[in-house]
Image (spheres, rainbow, N blue to C red):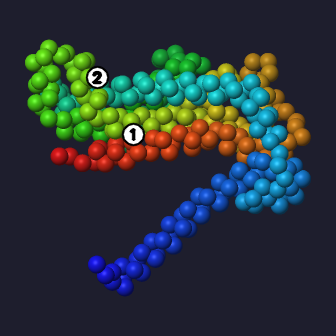
Amino acid sequence: MKRTLGEKAFQWVDIVVMIIIIATILFPFMNIISLSVSSREAIMQRSVSIWPKGFNLAAYREILGSTLFLRSLANTVGLTIIGTFLSVILTLMVSYAMTKDFLGKKFTTYFFVITMYFSGGLIPTYLVVAKYLNMRNTYMALILPALINVFYIIVMRSQIENIPSSIFDAAYIDGANEYQTVFQIVMPTITPTIAAISMFFALGKWNSWFPVMVYTDYQKFWTVQYYLRIVVFSKFIEARDGSELVLKEMQIPEENFRMAAIIIVALPIVAIYPFVQKYFVKGIISGAVKG
């Protein structure tokens, strides 16, 4: 089919816009990589653009050899794995429960939806977590407040509602209880949606830093994103004498060190994303279609 002049013009405009968008993402990222591996002299002269000048991995060695960074990385990995697992299980169970008829279902649904748009605010949340639940300076303060996302409950509930009722009837006739139905019938059926939501949860928990700043006082609770925040806004700090922060003077330029920290923190997610990208597409499409 022959395209009209307007369609061709639109296609060229679309291509130009996409190239501009790609360039705005790619060039800054290339600049960060170049600054992280360039020589001290090139960085001090501010002559590094998108291509590195010289080659220097001192910043990477310094970061990867830091006990504080390794502890922060271990915290982030642990919080991401545990938090994502608990979030997905709770989201699945709540979503399944919301597909059933029970007293007060309408009120509960509206109550859940309201929390998507209105929250208690930072100070009331802090008081609940720190004072009433007594979770300040504990790992639970970094896990519990962010376990549930109502939007994901709604998406997963719509998927469960699309499962034919005959499948549930057959499971009940065979003697399956509710837990067996959830984990042996529902979970395998909506795997793409669960995978997509799991990745969204994991990204959020990997990038989490604000709860560390609000609910903790000690470096042993730091995550890599909070470590990166400290690096970006100050010189590199070394843990010493508990929670004391000591600026460490180094021969490594600050810009070199900061960019290396950004690359190391972002690298795991960038490396994993291509392998789970297909689940984003399947999960989003299946979550958007009701049949």
Q: Amino acid at mark 1?
A: Ala
Q: Amino acid at mark 2?
A: Phe
Total numbered labels? 2
- In the rendered image, the vertical position of residue 151 relative to residue 171, given as above or below: below
Q: Residue at x 29, y 35 (%)?
A: 190
Quadrant housing residue 172 = top left
- Asked which secondary structure carries label 1, the reply is helix
Horizontal side, residue 185 vs residue 64: left or right = left
Residue 84 image point, x, y percent: 45, 28
Q: Residue at x 71, y 56 (%)?
A: 31
- In the rendered image, the vertical position of residue 274 relative to residue 145, given as above or below: below
Q: Is residue 139 visible in this depiction of the protein?
A: yes
Mark 1 vs 2, N-terminal side: 2
Q: Residue at x 75, y 34 (%)?
A: 63
Horizontal side, residue 181 vs residue 219: left or right = left
Quadrant of image for the N terminus:
bottom left
Numbered label attached to residue 183:
2
Between marks 1 and 2, how big is the CA–CA gap? 17 Å
Q: Is residue 217 visible in this depiction of the protein?
A: no
- Asked which secondary structure carries label 2, the reply is helix
Residue 24 image point, x, y percent: 60, 62
Horizontal side, residue 170 vs residue 250: left or right = left
Residue farthest along the front direction in this orientation: 1
Residue 35 image point, x, y percent: 76, 51
Numbered label attached to residue 229:
none
Give 58 or 90, whichever is nearer the viewer.
Answer: 58
Residue 170 image point, x, y percent: 11, 24
Numbered label attached to residue 196:
1
Give 221 or 161, whichever is nearer the viewer.
Answer: 161
Could you classify mark 1 by the number of other residues whose Cα lies within 10 Å: few (under 14), some (14-19), or many (20 or more)? many
Could you classify mark 2 by the number of other residues whose Cα lies within 10 Å: few (under 14), some (14-19), or many (20 or more)? some
